[in-house]
Amino acid sequence: MSGHSKWATIKHKKGAADAKRGKLFAKLIKQVEVAARSGGGDPDANPTLRTMFQKARDNSVPLDTIERAVKRGTGELEGVEYESITYEGYAPGGVALLIEVLTDNRNRTGSEIRSLLTKNGGSLAEPGAVAWQFQRKGVVKVARSVEEDDVMLVGLDHGAEDLDDHGEVWQLTCDPGDVVAMRRALEEAGIAVEESDSTMMPTNTIPMTAEADVKAVLRLIDLIDDHDDVQDVHSNIDIPDEVLEAVS
């Protein structure tokens, strides 16, 4: 259970350094609201809501703000109805992009995503062209200060498929349905969990070593990720450590 996911490392660093807390909060609250609307407001009966609720708490979203989002989702408070859409596309160099959005205006968001791609060396793909290169997985992250053997021991007993060293954190990968149980087991073992979520992971990656190409891809991903309606951007790019350090 070893290895490195450069893209996950990039995303972790970006998230940790992101000064736009208001925008991050807005995205997380939107995810909570949509989860409550689709599966009900009880986290114990709605695994998606439980995951989104915990994700918001992990990122320091105030509890009362989360609870209001749940009430908007269940209709107890007035709110906007969002549509979940996944766009597929390519960045420069043929790097695959899977772009998850929540929007109240499909036409506006689609047009803006297409524009961001085409103006920055990418392109929008037909549905299904990219999605097959990804699979949904659960991830649980714990501090890198915890001993690897301790994390692995708990993880193996609760469905862990892989354990990656992401520099500042250990990341356990599992079936999305095992996230809650694994998090609970780690915490009961005295291992503090920094974050848990479900995400799309590439089944194969594209190595990229030219600094100019890497910069172009990362710039496009950042532009897309900064869009208000975009909840997550998944990529199959694989960047060697030395190149990542050079462009960071």
Image (cartoon, helix red, strand yellow):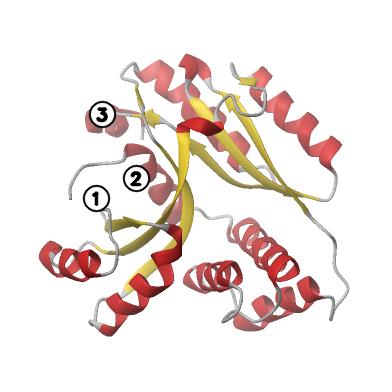
Which residue is at the front of the view, 179 or 62?
179
Q: Is residue 142 above or below residue 163?
A: below
Q: Nearer the viewer, residue 43 or 143?
A: 43
Disc 2/disc 3 C-alpha distance (Å): 11 Å
Mark sitting earlier along the chain (2/3): 2
Secondary structure of the residue carrying tag 2 is helix
On residue 240, which mark appears?
3
Secondary structure beneath label 3? loop
User: Is 12 on the left or on the right of 224, as rendered?
Assistant: left
Q: Mark 2 belongs to which amino acid?
A: Thr
Q: Is residue 39 above or below residue 9?
A: below
Cβ–Cβ under 8 Å for marks 2 and 3: no
> Circle 2 sits on which residue?
9
Left or right position of 232 against 38: left
Residue at screen point 71% across, 75% down: 40
Q: Position of residue 100 (x, y in %)?
A: 63, 44
Q: Counting residues from the N terminus, which is met first, the one under dot 1 or under dot 2? A: 2
Question: Could you classify mark 2 by the number of other residues whose Cα lies within 10 Å: few (under 14), some (14-19), or many (20 or more)?
Answer: some
Q: Please tell me whether mark 1 sits on a helix, a strand or a loop.
A: strand
Q: Quadrant of residue 10?
A: top left
Q: What's the residue type where badge 3 is placed?
A: Pro
Q: Earlier in the sequence, mark 3 or mark 1?
A: 1
Question: What number is the disc on residue 244?
Answer: none
Give the residue number, with chain letter if any, for mark 1.
Answer: 164
Q: Residues within 10 Å of mark 1 (few under 14, many from 20)?
A: some
Residue 238, percent from left and from top: 34, 29
Q: Amino acid at mark 1?
A: Asp
Image depth: mark 3 or mark 1 in front: 1
